[in-house]
Amino acid sequence: EAQLSESGGGLVQPGGSLRLSCAASGFTFSSYAMGWVRQAPGKGLEWVSGIGRIIGSTYYADSVRGRFTISRDNSKNTLYLQMNSLRAEDTAVYYCAKDGVHESVSAPDYFDYWGQGTLVTVSS
Amino acid sequence: DIQMTQSPSTLSASVGDRVTITCRASQSISSWLAWYQQKPGKAPKVLIYQASSLESGVPSRFSGSGSGTEFTLTISSLQPDDFASYYCQQYSSLSSVSFGQGTTLEIK
């Protein structure tokens, strides 16, 4: 069974940077698109970013485009999210999620496995 | 961008009730819709994908229907474990996805 484990969250000042990692296991990582979804305290789910199976296909929500960068290392089965110029409104639990379609040609799709989430708090 | 609107925002029901949650898309998304269940402090769990396909391991009391712009999630007979938040998600766009604002299912 697929497992995803996020790390790298924490407290950061406005304008600062943070890099999240997501270690994947239990499936052929290179065969699936991946994504990041966040949830602000007491709020709903917000899609943040996605990346295709092949490095180069990246997608971003308007709220983070130009500040966040998604990447993956298929040799290490790891997904990343580099977050720069952080704002208070970026405070949320960040989930790593696996695309539900094997070798999708139309990612991003729905998500069939999610990590436990890592909390990012942007505050002075 | 495709906007997803769920109704109601909150739903009060009793064990054994049949409940329906609606999700509307701002433009046609064909059948590219998923439903998730989320419990407090936990990650979301997919219930339905492609509007009506039941994810493996999900109880058959959950069902989904609809296409185009209007979709429904139905729970045929509520169980105590079903009280949670529910989200719809469209994945019709080639470069983004979006979620509904969520529906909280409460015990009456």
Image (cartoon, coloured by chain):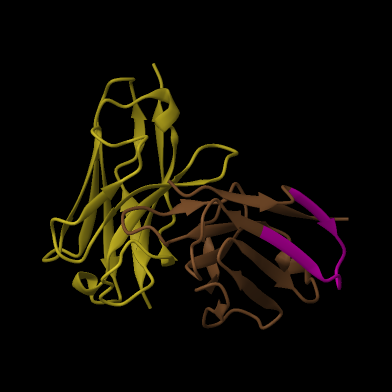
Q: Where is residue A5 in the image (x, y as percent from the top left)?
A: 34, 58
Letter of the brown chain: B
Q: Main secondary structure of the magenta part?
A: strand
A83 over B64 or under it: above or below: above
Q: Colour of chain A?
A: yellow
Identify the image quadrant of residue A109. Answer: bottom left
Q: Is residue A44 shown left or right of residue A81?
A: right
Q: Give the range drawn in magenta.
A: B10-22
Residue sitting at x 30%, y 61%? A34
Q: Which of A121 and A63 is in front in this view?
A: A63
Residue sitting at x 62%, y 71%? B66
A120 over B52 or under it: above or below: above
Residue sitting at x 85%, y 60%? B13
Residue that lies at the very extreme toward the top in this rendered image: A124
Quick check: is B56 in the magenta stretch?
no
Q: Is residue B5 shown left or right of residue B108?
A: left
Q: Where is residue A2 in the image (x, y as percent from the top left)?
A: 36, 73
Residue sitting at x 48%, y 63%? B29
